Image (cartoon, rainbow, N blue to C red):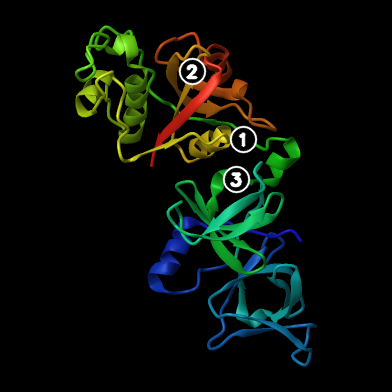
Amino acid sequence: MKKRALFLAVSIFSLSVALHLPPQVAAANGNNTAGFVVTTSGNLNVRSGRSSSSARVGVLERGSYVTLIEKEGSWWKVEYADGAYGYAHADYIRPVSKTYERTVHTTSGRLNVRSGAGTSFPVQDKIASGDEVVVLVESKGWSRIVYDGNKTGYVLSSYLRSQEDMTDGQLYPAVSLKVADYKQTDSRWANKVLGNSGQTIRQIGCTTTAMAMLETYRTGKTIYPNTLADQMSYTSGGALYWPSDYVVSTNSNYLETIYARLREGKPVMIGAKTRSGGQHWVVVTGYTGGKELTPSKFTINDPGNGARTQLQQFFDIYPLFYKIAYYR
């Protein structure tokens, strides 16, 4: 059974939480897909028909959300659990206005639903690709959703698609980040020695240069590679020690991860090797959109070569994926 989801304005949701009150809602209309239970005490009965004499088939807790199917007289037909339908009296449900249905889209099976907005929160459930969810609020790449009728949790927004995206075949909508484009050969820092290695940014500084792009984007301040080099630690051979606030991954599903981070507004560093062992790093800055994730549609800033602007061009020279890295 497909699930439903709704989108509620951030300001309304935040205010309701702060005041411990149900969110302000408008009168029901054809666009409403969820409601807020507003009983004065106790739970709200869900019945098999539009009558208080009909059998009780379930209950909804006060202060919970529920998926609304349609209004029939003074009763709402609701999905009160996954695939379970019944009727609840409209006097005790406030329809939520301005809602948006979203479809889950993943290539790895099921989407994690977490108890909070972040990967540090525990996984409480999983949703199948193709299921519909209802987004209550979206912030910083995470959406609070209603799923399975009346459950709530948090998912990465990058795995949710609008009906327009699904119809147009844009399963992966375009995203573009304006990231500073630094080159290792820039005379302002090309001869900067990395640690005690005796090697310069021009020679081996692709990682440092790429990270300077990310840090400039993250902080909103200009951080050149030579400035960053003074703040970093290096091995005797000039390899960069990763800062503690960076995630470094060798997961083979790296294209999905890169796209998810881009949708969160985070550029991603990616490293790859030649078959003889040569290594290089670039910064992924966007995706041009499409039905599937392909390297040719990812845009990059290459610290070593200004002519390479697509990830596929990078892989043509460095075909062996190594790692990705991004800030938390």
* Numbered label attached to residue 273: 2
Q: Callout 3: few (<14), some (14-19), or many (20+) C-alpha neighbours within 10 Å?
A: many
Residue 211 percent location from the top left of the image:
35, 26
Amino acid of disc 3: Tyr
Above or below: residue 173 compared with residue 282:
below
Q: Residue at x 69, y 55 (%)?
A: 132
Residue 65 percent location from the top left of the image:
59, 70
* Numbered label attached to residue 173: 1
Q: Quadrant of the C terminus?
A: top left
Q: Quadrant of residue 81?
A: bottom right
Q: Residue at x 72, y 41 (%)?
A: 166
Q: Looking at the image, how many numbered discs can be counted on the residues?
A: 3
Q: Residue at x 68, y 40 (%)?
A: 165
Considering depth in this image, is 188 or 193 the residue closer to the camera?
193
Q: Callout 2: few (<14), some (14-19), or many (20+) C-alpha neighbours within 10 Å?
A: some
* Numbered label attached to residue 59: none
* Residue 26 visible, this angle: no
Separation of disc 2 and disc 3 at Cα? 29 Å
